[in-house]
Amino acid sequence: MRNWFVHIAIIFPLCCQCTTRQTHEGALADFKLLGPDSVTVGQKFTIRLMGKEKLSNSPIYLMRHATWGTTIDTFDPGQTITMVDTLTGWVSAEVLYEGIKISQKAYHVLPMGATMPLDTYLGSKSVIANGQDWAMLTAIPTDTFGNLVQAQTPVRFELVRPSDFVENKQAFTKHGVAYQIITAQTKAGKTLGYVSVDRVKSKEKELLEVADYPIDFRIWAEDTTPFADGRQTFKIKTDVLKDRFGNTVPDGTLVLFECQDANNTLRHLNGYTLEGIATIFVQNPISAGSLRIRASVNGGGKSNLFTVTFITKK
């Protein structure tokens, strides 16, 4: 019997404490956290705690949880907090008083419009002007605080093509990105790309559209002397090398020349185009007979077989 009194003496205060705490939590449940459902970054706004019960002088905390982390602020005596958010996303706000959560609210922080600099990216930097090759112009618009703009924000792409034709296209941001595929035309030159969001315009992007591999071409000789003396030289030149669409190949295109003399000795000489024409200088053979020359571009066209005849000098 004595043990029963001991147990009752211990349990009774605990029950009273639990009942008091539940009653306290129930009374505090009447508090409401008032504030906007959505705000724009950089916008000053106020959160107010409203309730029937008067709270003691214990501090009241506002705890905010977001993707960027958790912050804790203290309410002023008027139970208000004025703040400014600079990062976008959903924020869950909770009010803590004497270790008890007495109210909560969620609000959405929205980005501002796009501002400079407007980040744009172009890849690749050059394409073959064959009507099939392509590159991509990408834009990632952000606001003053570096937040991605809202989804479905319209982004305009202006392309000035080598043919001087202007293309205007539009895309919408998704996951912060908008892009435009640039398909090569068949005229070599430069495509200039501009991106704009509202009144914000990017810097110019330059896409180089270069000629495709050249088609078959012709070679010929200049300044020849007919003597097989091993001392004189003469010049071999190509036509202006062009692709199937009539575009001149870029400067520096490698042209391989094969020279085979009357003794079947084979020499390989490299030439490089300048304004579409490749030129090499060939030394006269030491033996009389025909020197056969052919040129080719790896992956492209070949030339005719050109023959020069040499005689022994008397």
Image: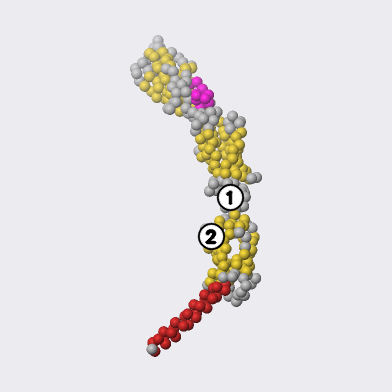
Q: Quadrant of the C terminus?
A: top left
- Give coordinates of residue 225: x percent, y percent: 45, 14
Going 59% across and 43% down the picture, which residue do you hit?
155
Query: Dot 1 surroundings within 10 Å: few (below 14), some, or many (20 or more)?
Result: many
Determine the CA span between mark 2 and mark 1: 18 Å
- Give coordinates of residue 98: x percent, y percent: 54, 74
Give the structural element (helix, strand or loop) at label 2.
strand
Return the residue nearer the eye: 239 or 177. Answer: 177
Q: Residue furthest left?
A: 263
Q: Quadrant of the N terminus?
A: bottom left
Q: Vertical placement of 256 versus 134: above or below?
A: above
Does 245 appear in magenta? yes
Residue that numbered label 2 is attached to: 66
Label for residue 150? 1
Going 50% across and 24% down the picture, which residue do you hit?
244
Going 39% across and 12% down the picture, which residue do you hit?
312
Which of the 4 image quarters holds residue 61? bottom right
Helix, strand or loop for the magenta stretch, by majority: loop
Label for residue 39? none
- Amino acid type of the residue that numbered disc 1 sits on in the rendered structure: Gln
- Give coordinates of residue 186: x percent, y percent: 53, 28
Query: Dot 2 surroundings within 10 Å: few (below 14), some, or many (20 or more)?
Result: some
The reply to whether residue 36 is visible in this rendering is yes
Magenta span of residues = 238-250
Q: Residue furthest top?
A: 314
Does 277 appear in magenta? no
